[in-house]
Amino acid sequence: MALKLITAGESHGPGLTCVVEGLPAGLELDREAIDRDMARRQLGHGRGGRMKIERDRADVTGGVRHGRTLGGPIALQVANRDFANWEERMNPWPVEADVPEVHLPRPGHADLAGVQKYGFTDVRNVLERASARETAARVAGGALAKAFLRAVGVEIVSHVTQIGSVQAPERNGLAFEDFADVDASPVRCLDAHVSKAMVEEINVLRKRNESLGGVFEVRAFGLVPGLGSHVSWESRLDGRIGLAMLSIQAVKGCGIGDGFDLAGRPGSAAHDEIFYEEERGYFRETNRSGGVEGGMSTGEPLVVRCGMKPLPTLTKPLRSVDIATREPAEALRERTDSCTVPAAGVVGEAMLAIVLAGAYREKFGGDHVDDVRAALAAYEERIGWKRRRP
């Protein structure tokens, strides 16, 4: 049983649509929890004017009855309130008004490659779909995947570890409870002192007409060992995670566990030694591998770190070329954010949830959520797994 997610829609179009297929019947959904994740995606110091317009919520239009899934595809819609200001420019149907084309591609964006690939003369035909506004639909679908994961004992959280040049110190042994108040930070950082420094970094660079990137970390607690597989490249869990995370707009790097740091260590300092105790079962005292070995989950917390580049839309545009005249020009200046790393962490939660929910569906099947739980319990008994609470 595979889990599939597809989104449709443009940044300033009528709205965004998400369809999730593969969730079992009988799964209880919490509308407030879904909309809470939608609101969390809009959080973070450094967001621009668009967030003052939108008040995102996901409306279910199919696949759910009285708060429970029916086993078929689930459709969600997220309205774009800003469409009222763009109705002539982004109407799905022909309009009488003369709508000017955009000919100024932005360095670092999909603009130029997109018009070359699809044969457009108007950059807006590319930038609208390439925009990170699309992630609102992913977060809506990811909230459904999170609901399924909670039903099998898994929780997913995230936090920001770096914005610009400001980096939080490494913290070992983070537990699920440590993330209870992470959204209270304006940059979703667990360290209050570093959080203030990150806010100041954004303020300083924003005044210089700069955008900022950074690093966010996503963790999953409560995973059973054996998700994914070593037998084929497309089945490896870390490969699937990398695909999902690198598909997030502006994410340029993804590491599992200690990631690139492992490359410079000797083997004795790179791997997680294995122990066994009757009351705990198999366990590791370190988690350098980030909860994945040989393409499979180990049962330790899953740790994924993503590096995000600064956004390519700048208030002081970079040099570019007008695609109509081929003459030098400044890149398009569109409304934008200064920093979206805190929001990207919430998108990362959604993408990791989609991958992990899919891995559970593939391994344990089941038409009803109770069937999934029964298959999971039988597997845990067979391997002698001592369930660890998130």
Image: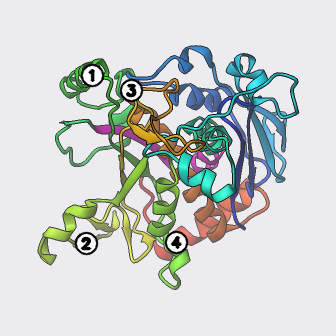
Three-letter amino acid code at the position of disc 2: Phe
In the picture, the disc for residue 208 is 1
Q: Residue at x 68, y 20 (%)?
A: 82
132 or 145, nearer to the observer: 132
Of labels 3 and 2, earlier in sequence is 2
Instruction: Single out the mark in the foreground, 3 or 4.
Output: 3
Helix, strand or loop under label 4: loop
Measure the C-alpha gap from mark 1 to mark 3.
Answer: 11 Å
Could you tell me if the residues under marks 3 and 4 are in contact, i.e. CB atoms within 8 Å?
Answer: no
Q: Amino acid at mark 3?
A: Ser
Q: Earlier in the sequence, mark 1 or mark 2?
A: 1
The quadrant of the rendering that contains the N terminus is bottom right
Farthest residue, direction top: 52
Q: Which label's residue is closer to the chain start, 1 or 4?
A: 1
The numbered mark, 2 or 4, whose residue comes first in the sequence reads 4
**Which numbered disc, 3 or 4, marks the residue that appears first in the sequence?**
4
Query: At x 43% / y 46%, what residue is drawn?
Result: 108
Q: Which residue is mark 4?
A: 228
Q: Position of residue 369 (x, y in %)?
A: 72, 54
Q: Secondary structure at mark 2?
A: strand
State the residue position of label 3. Answer: 338
Q: Position of residue 370 (x, y in %)?
A: 72, 56
Query: Magenta stretch containing residue 191, yes or no?
Result: no
The CA span between labels 1 and 4 is 46 Å
Q: Quadrant of residue 296?
A: bottom left
Give left or right: position of 138 versus 327. Answer: right
- Relative image position of residue 132 (x, y in whole percent): 55, 38
Distance from disc 2 to disc 4, alpha carbons, whole Å, reads 22 Å
**Start-end of magenta stretch:** 144-162
Task: Measure how far apart labels 3 and 2 are at the Cα level.
Answer: 46 Å
Q: Secondary structure at mark 3?
A: loop
